[in-house]
Image: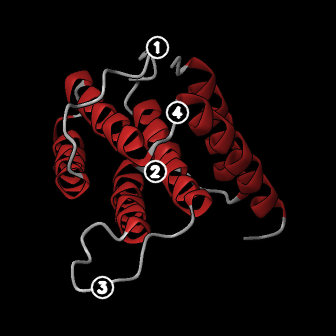
Amino acid sequence: MNLEKLFTMQEELDRYIQTNNEVNGDLFDKKGLALIVELAELANETRTFKFWSSKGPSDREVILEEYVDSIHFLLSLGIDRDLNMLKDWPKPLNDNDLTTLFLKTNSSILKFMEQHSMSAYQTVWSCYGAIAEILGFTYDDVMEAYLAKNQKNYDRQKDGY
């Protein structure tokens, strides 16, 4: 999946949000924490780790929306560290256990937050690619959901979210 369009759209959204809210300065750490929180919200909706509960995962649409919330922040972090030259989604990790993937993804985010390297950034993308595969999300699903959530984020800003 080509990421160029997503980076462009995210950069425009970030600029709009920061201008609309009169936010200046380096937001990298705040966005990094937001990505970790969004990953946790995604894990919570899948319920993959909730061995004590018989309740199943949330609806696919809810899980997909949580997934693309993460993608928004992942793109934004790349933009902040001038890594938006990443053209294509890196090959997904080869792991079939969703709980393990959530842990690996969290670890890869923390590593990226310390190193800011392209290699560390690509690893985060690879983790998210593997999560998408396990959840049955295609790149088209992700793109469509990203576009919808991007518009929702603009609408929220206009409504004083």
Rendered position, 72 above or below 39 = above
The residue beneath circle 1 is 87
Mark 2 Cα shell of 10 Å, populated few (<14), some (14-19), many (≥20) = many
Q: Are marks 3 and 1 in contact (CB under 8 Å)?
A: no
Horizontal side, residue 147 vs residue 73: left or right: right
Label 4 neighbour load within 10 Å: few <14, some 14-19, many 20+: few
- The numbered mark, 2 or 4, whose residue comes first in the sequence reads 2
Q: Residue 139: x and y, percent?
A: 54, 29
Q: CA distance from mark 2 to mark 3?
A: 25 Å
Amino acid type assigned to the residue bearing label 1 in the image: Lys
With 134 as the anchor, is 105 left or right in this view?
A: left
Badge 2 amino acid: Ser
What residue is disc 2 on?
Answer: 70
First in sequence: mark 3 or mark 1?
3
N-terminal-most mark, 2 or 1 = 2
Q: How is the image coloured?
A: secondary structure
Local packing at callout 1 (Cα closer than 10 Å; few below 14, some 14-19, many 20+) is some
Three-letter amino acid code at disc 4?
Answer: Thr
- Asked whether, in this view, residue 90 is left or right of residue 103, the answer is right
The residue identified by callout 4 is 138
Q: CA distance from mark 2 to mark 4?
A: 16 Å
Q: Amino acid at mark 3?
A: Ser
Q: Which residue is mark 3?
A: 53
Q: Secondary structure at mark 2?
A: helix
Residue under the point 77% across and 48% down:
151
Secondary structure, mark 3, is loop
